[in-house]
Image: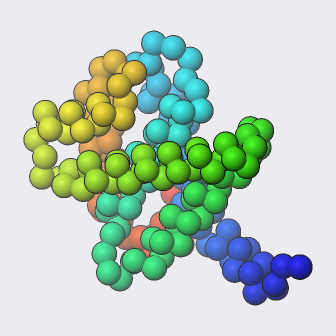
Amino acid sequence: MIDNKIIYNILYMSEKYIHIYNNLINYTRNKDLYKNLNRQDNFSDRLTFFLLHFSFFLKNFKNDENKNILQEIYDFNFRQLELSIREIGYGDQSINKKMKVYINLLHSMVSEIHFWDKLSKSEKLKKISIFLADFQNIEELLDYFDNFNLNLSKKTLNSYLKSVSNP
């Protein structure tokens, strides 16, 4: 039997962070991101873009004041990803392996973009190319993520928590 407090926390977090998750998902649905891919996009491509957006989000709002909230958002987003993978039809063992890969990928992305604002354009291109190797014209994607990063830096975490922003 599930404890009522656990159910309350799950529902509270779902209501509190679903807007951020949905906005990140909406960013990944931007068809312009995939125009330089010479094949049909797949779940892996969409997940890579989701994690890149999430990495920039975490980078911009990481500070001592936001530490607990960002951890809750992180946990919530990975729970949502796990549910999405289950809906696709993967089994428990596959899901556990895939989640470890995705978590490691996110941590790698966060590490690579940590000093994004201090990097030269060529350094940024190298960093973003690590994750988007199948894409041509990475410069357009670099411009996109530079703008995304800039837009994030102009807002507060609280503004993302209290409103539904449009990608």
Q: Residue furthest top?
A: 38
Q: Answer above or below: position of 147 versus 40.
A: below
Query: What colour scheme governs how the chains and residues are painted in the rendered image of this protein?
Result: rainbow
Q: Nearer the viewer, residue 75 or 154?
A: 75
The quarter of the picture where residue 87 lies is top right
Q: Answer above or below: position of 105 versus 59.
A: above
The quarter of the picture where residue 107 lies is bottom left
Q: Quadrant of the N terminus?
A: bottom right
Q: Tell whether 71 sits left or right of 75.
A: left
Residue 99 pos. (x, y %): 57, 50
Q: Residue furthest front?
A: 93
Residue 112 pos. (x, y %): 26, 48
Residue 158 pos. (x, y %): 45, 74
Q: Residue furthest right?
A: 1
Q: Nearer the viewer, residue 56 or 30?
A: 56
Residue at the spot x=30%, y=20% of the render?
137
Q: Answer above or below: position of 149 versus 159.
A: above
Q: Answer above or below: position of 107 versus 162.
A: above
Q: Tell whether 162 sits left or right of 124.
A: right
Residue 156 pos. (x, y %): 37, 70
Q: Tell whether 53 sits left or right of 81.
A: left
For the question of whether residue 161 can be seen, the reply is no
Residue at the spot x=51%, y=64% of the render?
74
For the question of whether residue 137 can be seen, the reply is yes
